[in-house]
Amino acid sequence: MTELSWVPTSCTLPTEQQPLRVAEWDELFADRLITSARTDRLRLRLVLAGGAGVEETVRDLAARESGCCSFFTFIVTPANDDHVQLDVEVDPPREMVLDALQTRTAAEAGAR
């Protein structure tokens, strides 16, 4: 998968900033992703290793992503002291974006 292949064309983030945002997600996945599972056709659940500032980082990144890709709904839930759960939902026309995100996160989870 190429670096920007999961970024939808409807994203309003300026093109030159998109690689930086993708890198932020990739860093989060590389450092913290434990599992990635599709809980519904339009929902992806990510479980991330917790730690100091992780929940705040996830909330900040999700809020910024929602600002440029309003079709995403992010639900951040501290699962316990050791984990943060991030549910990512999309509307039906954006299911392919969620498919691509799942492929990206599944590859990262498999590398751990």
Image: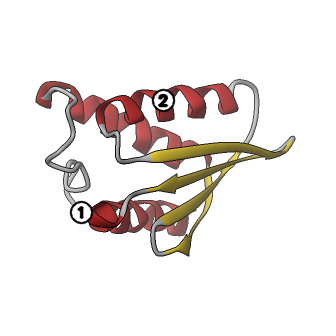
Q: Position of residue 3 (x, y in %)?
A: 23, 49
Is 99 above or below relative to 13?
A: below
Mark 2 is on which residue type? Ala
Q: Position of residue 37 (x, y in %)?
A: 57, 70
Identify the image quadrant of the N terminus. bottom left
Q: Position of residue 35 (x, y in %)?
A: 62, 63
Query: Image point 74% across, 40% down: which residue?
Result: 50
Is 6 above or below relative to 54?
A: below
Query: Image point 65% across, 25% down: which residue?
Result: 56
Q: Is residue 12 left or right of residue 39?
A: left
Q: Is residue 42 left or right of residue 58?
A: left
Categorize mark 2 by other alpha carbons within 10 Å: few (<14), some (14-19), many (20+). Answer: some
> Foreground: 12 or 85?
12
Label 2, secondary structure: give it.
helix
Query: Image point 36% across, 29% down: which residue?
Result: 67
Label 1, secondary structure: give it.
loop
Q: Report the Cα–Cα distance between label 1 and label 2.
A: 25 Å
Mark 1 is on which residue type? Met
Q: Residue furthest right?
A: 81
* Residue highlighted by disc 2: 63
Q: Position of residue 86 (x, y in %)?
A: 61, 49
* Residue highlighted by disc 1: 1
Among the two numbered marks 1 and 2 on one chain, the one whose residue lies closer to the N terminus: 1
Categorize mark 1 by other alpha carbons within 10 Å: few (<14), some (14-19), many (20+). Answer: few
Q: Is residue 110 left or right of residue 54?
A: left
